[in-house]
Amino acid sequence: MSTDFSRNARTSLDREYAYMAYGMIAGAVPGIVAGFVVAAFVGHAAMWLSVLGGIGIVLGLVTGILLHRRRHASAGTADPLERGAAPE
């Protein structure tokens, strides 16, 4: 296993994890902002931030997975780096 973490993600699984991470961040930010807005009028800031932030994270995670699957399926070509066995 390569331990060089400075290189770009190469395998489909690495790219899927990147999509999931970006999706969770993209979902958390609006969720937290919405939590602040709701808490300004209702109160209980910690509760609303955690609830709406968590919902945003889950929605972002699912969206990231779906985007990766759609783009991976539309590519239609197999990734040459994802062979079943090591090259001889």
Image: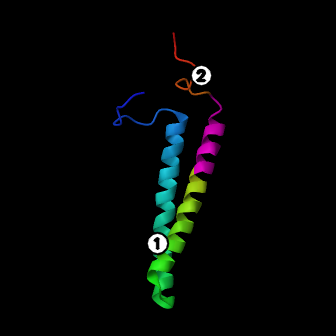
Where on the picture, by quarter, is residue 12?
Answer: top right
For label 2, the crowd category at 10 Å Cα-Cα, with few meaning under 14, some 14 to 19 and many 20 or more, is few
Dot 1: few (<14), some (14–19), or many (≥20) neighbours within 10 Å?
Answer: many
Image location of residue 63, percent across then percent down:
60, 55
Q: Is residue 67 magenta?
A: yes
Instruction: Give how far across and how far down residue 14 sits, in percent.
Output: 49, 38
Q: Which residue is drawn at 36% across and 36% down?
A: 5
Amino acid type for the residue under numbered disc 1: Ile
Of 72 and 3, the residue lying toward us: 3
Secondary structure of residue under mark 1 = helix
Q: In this view, does 50 lie above or below 86?
A: below
Residue 85: percent from left, percent from top: 56, 18
Residue 22: mark in rendering: none
Residue at 52% x, 25% y: name it.
Answer: 81
Q: Where's the N terminus, which quadrant?
A: top left
Residue at the top extreme, as displayed: 88
Q: What secondary structure is found at the residue carrying circle 2?
A: loop
* Residue 67 x %, y %: 60, 49
The reply to whether the magenta stretch includes residue 88 is no
Type of amino acid under label 2: Gly
Report how far apart the C-alphas of labels 1 and 2 lie in the structure: 42 Å
Magenta stretch, overall SS: helix
Give the residues drawn in magenta, as a range.
65-77
Q: Which residue is drawn at 57% across and 27% down?
A: 79
Which of the two discs, 1 and 2, labels the residue nearer the N terminus? 1
Residue marked by disc 2: 84
Q: Name the residue under label 1.
A: 32
Observer-nearest of 86 and 19: 86
Residue 73 picture quarter: top right
